[in-house]
Amino acid sequence: MREWSRGVSKRREKRVREIKEGKRFAHPGDPGSGFRLPSTKKQSHPAGKWDELPWNRSGDWMGEGMRKKKESRLLIQVFLSFFLLTGTYLVFQTQTPSARVAQAFIAEVMERDYNFEGVARWYERNIGSAPAFLPAFEGKNSPSGDRKPVAWVAPLKGEVVRPYREGEKGVVIRATSNAPVVSAAEGWVVEAGPEKGLGQTVVIRHADGQESWYGWLGKIRVKEKDWVKARELLGEVGGRDGEPLLFFALKQGGEFVDPTGVVPIE
């Protein structure tokens, strides 16, 4: 046992001396080293050379793989673009009723500005927070000079028979029976259905959080989460007690204001 320990000590001392003298140890794979490297190819290599494994090859072998993936993705994108372009061309070359509907839809989508704000509000309402990939929009604390003014139009032709009074939220407009009611400005339909005290009601959210309310409707022609333009049909006048009336209100900064001071009601 002592002889074995002395042998180990001698080998350790010899190794330390070699390190101090700067002698090179046998590299795995060198002749006489006692080590062998796994090789995928059965071929001989010059002394001191590593096997030609991918990480030992010269050149940007990782970049080559990435380039191949990008080329494949580009081919897929080109194919999908060609497919959409061809499909659109065929739709516009067809004159069937269904094709005309599709043509009108495509033309309308291509002409209008993309509604980033509407998408952001829908995302917040249904997901819980604004998506990071959409632009940020002005909030209530934004300077008034930076806000894009809303272009208001009259929701219908009629006469204001009950003006705005504090505590009543909006005004009452008398119109003809079943008169069309249109959106007073572009916006997002946040409510479309029965509302306590107002019957069938549509609520539209506009820029900077402003809301227009349309109550006592007979029929509703839009649904919740629709994006509507100014003058787009929302429904028809219903009324109260057999009289064709529309309740119209405007909400700004969380408070109801006199809509006749903002919207040009005829």
Image (cartoon, grey):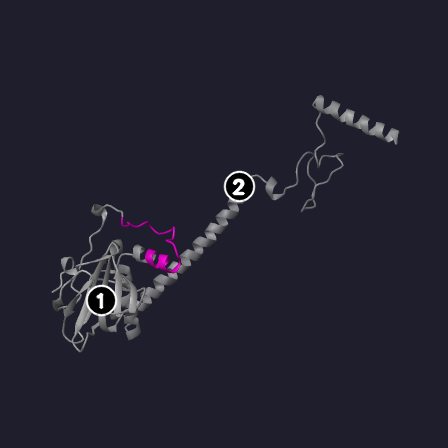
Residue 108 falls in which quadrant of the image? bottom left
Secondary structure under the numbered disc 2 in the rendered image: loop
Instruction: Say which amino acid is labelled 1.
Output: Tyr
Residue 62 in picture, x, y percent from top left: 54, 44
The extreme top residue here reads 21
Write down the region rendered in magenta.
120-140
In the foreground, 3 or 203: 203
Q: Quadrant of the C terminus?
A: bottom left
Main SS category, magenta section = loop
Q: Residues within 10 Å of mark 1 (few under 14, many from 20)?
A: many
Q: Which mark is residue 26?
A: none
Asked if residue 137 is among those painted magenta in the image, a careful observer would answer yes
In the foreground, 194 or 98: 194
Horizontal relation, residue 185 to residue 22: left or right: left
Q: Is residue 159 above or below residue 259?
A: below
Report, in whole angstroms, how far the alpha carbon at label 2 lies from the one at label 1: 65 Å
Q: Residue at x 80, y 28 (%)?
A: 11
Q: Residue at x 14, y 57 (%)?
A: 261
Horizontal relation, residue 161 to residue 209: left or right: left
Residue 93 in view (yes/no): no
Contact? badges 2 and 1 (CB < 8 Å): no
- Name the residue that disc number 1 marks: 214
The extreme bottom residue here reads 242
Residue 22 in picture, x, y percent from top left: 69, 23
In the foreground, 197 or 157: 197
- Name the residue that disc number 2 marks: 60
Earlier in the chain: of badge 2 and badge 1, it is 2
Residue 220 falls in which quadrant of the image? bottom left
Secondary structure under the numbered disc 1 in the rendered image: strand
Residue 142 in picture, x, y percent from top left: 26, 47
